[in-house]
Image (cartoon, rainbow, N blue to C red):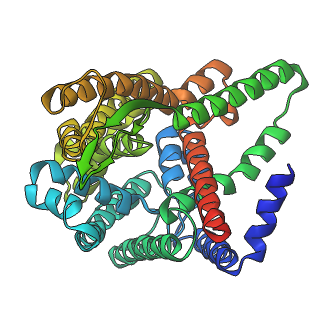
Amino acid sequence: MQKFFHKLTLIFTEPAIRNRVLFVLGALVVFRLLASIPIPGVDEVVLQQFFSNNQFLGLLNIFSGGGLANLSIVMLGVGPFITASIIMQLMTVMSPQLKSMYTEEGEAGRAKFTQYGRMLTLPLAILQGFGFLSLLQSQGVIAGLSTFEFIVNVVLIVSGSILLMWIGELMTEYGIGNGMSILIFAGIVAGLPATASQLFFSFNPSELPLYIGFAFVALAIIYAVIVMTEAERPVPITYAKQSRGGATYGGSSSYLPLRLNQAGVIPIIFALSIMLLPQMVLNILTAFDIPWVAGANETVTALLSNQLLYGSVYFLLVFLFTFFYTAVTFDPDAIAKNLQRNGAFIPGLRPGAHTSEYLGSLITRLTLVGASFLGLIAVVPTIMQAATGIAALAIGGTAVLIVVSVVLDLIRRVDAQLSLREY
């Protein structure tokens, strides 16, 4: 405890760290102010009913940083930028030039790669904004808008998304931690008081055992998320001895850490984007008065409202995308070549193809566990709501995963800054 307070004191006494922390806090204040400004023409009563009956939009609200719940000017959040970043990373599989830019051209290549992601964010934000507003207008949440007013609203929320992307990048550069993750984290935390008050005012003494059981389950989920986020499989590595000029170098041992969850929350985000795509496309097509679109839109909405079907498809998509994203970001052949180039090998294995085959088999087994855990975390709200029948007790497993990941990352970065000052 004494060590904790010592670190806390250093955070606010060291000017460099203090300025970074204060910049992040100031940016979060600006973000929450923007998230409280609604777009014109919103019927708040219909909006609350619509969100309470649509868990899918509740999940999307997490990734908008809480701005979607009241249809603020930043209702899209950093979702378009995150989707663009994922698409760019997936494009490296199909484009050798993009892969070379991202992996071999250093900081300049990654900066250009990120710039392409920013450019892709704009058309994605326009498509998502148009789709969301079309959906909300068809459900009566936004009523009485003329064509000009509708276009103005699209421009507003697209501009809000681009502004939020800029704020997030400033937080990454001048603050501590990943700005995009912190914005999502802030939106989740900002919703806790409303959830707590809903539980308090709807409390029924006869349901006390249910609330106690919920508390234990919530703590167990948080503990499991922390363990799975930090879990890794160390692969022992030995460096061969080398003689140069009469001196002997190498011969040391180390290990290669393989994380149990290589993909983080990206498969969940990508699964949400895929599940949203059909409804978004159909809502855009409704503007052209195509006969079959209305029926198809009702069918898709009914399917998403089926909790069992929705949960099964969601779990499957998260499971598959975890394997896919891990395959994109983790290349056993490249790692085996780098080990061989640096004179390192895994004891008991030949360098090259044998090492690559071993690493590929190991990461597949680790990803199987990580993908199952991510899929379970994604459908936890559905399971809890079905088990308790109380919507307020639906534990947001995805939200818990994001919060824990961001907090652990912030702790590591602050410790790194403090260690840098001490040395």
Residue 45 in sight here: no
Q: Which of the 4 image quadrants contains residue 260? A: top left
At x 30%, y 67%, the residue is 121
Between 91 and 65, the one nearer to me in the picture: 91
The tally of labels here is: 0
Q: In the image, is 356 to the left or to the right of 178? A: left
Residue at the extreme right of the image, as rendered: 205
- Residue positioned 66% across, 65% down in the render: 418
For this view, does 378 lie left or right of residue 91? right
246 relative to 174 in the view: left or right: left
Question: Quadrant of residue 162 in the image?
Answer: bottom left
* Rendered residue at 72%/30% (across/down): 219
Residue 408 picture location, percent across and down: 60, 48
On screen, residue 147 above or below 71: below
* Residue found farthest to the front: 246
Percent of width and height locating residue 306 = 43, 26
Please report the residue visible at 85 percent of the width from the left and 48 percent of the height from the top: 1
In which quadrant is the C terminus drawn?
Answer: bottom right
- The image shows residue 353 at horizontal and vertical percentages of 13, 29
For this view, does 310 lie left or right of residue 390? left
Eyeballing the image, is 418 above or below 138?
A: below
Q: Nearer the viewer, residue 378 or 16?
A: 16
Percent of width and height locating residue 286: 25, 54
Q: Nearer the viewer, residue 323 or 393?
A: 323
Say whether residue 270 is visible: yes
Q: Which image quadrant is residue 316 in? A: top left
